[in-house]
Image (spheres, rainbow, N blue to C red):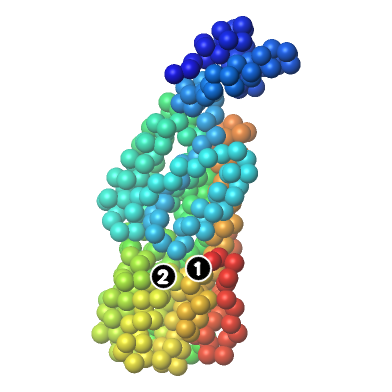
Amino acid sequence: MVTINDVAKRAGVSISTVSNVINKNKYVSDVLAERVNAAVRELDYTADPIARKMKIKHTKTIGVISADLCGLFFPHVLKGMYDVLISRGYKLIVMDSEGVHDSIGSIKKLREGITSLIQDRVDGIAFFSMVPEKMEAGIISDVMRASSKKPTVFVCVEKDLSGYGIDSVYANSERGADTAASHLIGAGCRRIGHISGPVFFTVVQDRMAGYKNALERNGLAVDEQRMIAHGDYSHKSGYLAMKELLGRMPDIDGVFVANDQMSVGAMKALFETGRRIPEDVKVIGYDDVFIASVLEPSLSTIHVQKHVMGKRAAELLIDQIENNREPAVPGTAVEIESRLIVRRSTVKDAPEDWILVDW
């Protein structure tokens, strides 16, 4: 294996001169630089990336820990991060905590993922936290200790952890859910069920709170045991949860589903039982992933700016890394605005609006 020593001998210069030419650390005269570059070409020398990273302050590498790589939401956030990071010369390492399926398993994988990424000497980590609120402080303390040897910056996506000194990019899920449920009420629904995501996830609890707020504000009682069923964000869980709700609420006339993917399953269950959408049951989802616009009928939903969320997360990471910004309490919190999208699952004659750009 060709080493930097071999290059230095061939070029007739010192090892430090070779290093300065390759890494562009210091000025080297054009004559010496050409001798080094010629030796590199002749010997087909490639610098050891691991050794190189050990000698420089930044590795220009970012780690991302997803909650569900197979979900329809995350890839759009990742693309936003990718666009910014690649344009600034950074590389990405993507891992999955599978947090939507198992809280305890998710916590274990989140810890392991962060430890692994720090060992790989990443400069920063963006993560989706599925950690229950009561366990956040302890886990974040563990993470900060793990990152003390190799300074690593963090950004939390979709959840506000700025109170712990972690920069965060998120949308207001409680407000969005209130808007969704209020839309159903405005469309004439009075017996409105809710299909939630994994109950241990704070964002899910926020959406459930928004649903309850809207109903109670409009004089509609909420019986959680009868009116709320739980899924795991997958289309299958939405199907099973809708079947469960129909068994408890055969007269249901509206349902707010905590994400669009579960809405697909919920709509299938409604069709199988002879319910017409929106005439018999109105359905509204959350996130506005591409499938929402091409379903039949098309799905009303809350549009989350997924790509923007990813871009802002990447910008916060780069700001911390390149400006050597010290952690502060509270950290920077960036709230991304959401909005209601009305389609034919709640309003029969709503205009079509295929989202072809996300395909």
Instruction: Answer with mark 1 or mark 2, whichever residue precedes in sequence.
Output: 2
Q: Is residue 329 among the parts visible in the rendering? A: no
Q: Secondary structure at mark 1?
A: loop
Do the residues under discs 1 and 2 have CB atoms within 8 angstroms?
yes
- x, y percentage for residue 153? 50, 37
Image quarter of residue 357: bottom right
Local crowd size for mark 2, using a 10 Å CA cut-off: few (<14), some (14–19), many (≥20): many
In the image: residue 306, left or right of residue 25: left
Q: Amino acid at mark 1?
A: Val
Q: Which residue: 40% across, 76% down?
A: 264
293 versus 105 height, above or below:
below
- Which label number is shown at residue 278? none
Which residue lies most toward the front here? 42
- x, y percentage for residue 243? 28, 81
Q: Which residue: 37% across, 91% down?
A: 275
Local crowd size for mark 1, using a 10 Å CA cut-off: few (<14), some (14–19), many (≥20): many
Q: Amino acid at mark 2?
A: Gln
Would you name the residue on which mark 1 appears?
289
250 versus 62 height, above or below:
below
Q: CA distance from mark 1 to mark 2?
A: 8 Å
| Of 253 and 70, the residue lying toward us | 70
83 versus 285 height, above or below:
above
Q: Secondary structure at mark 2?
A: helix
Q: Which residue: 36% across, 87% down?
A: 271
Image quarter of residue 234: bottom left
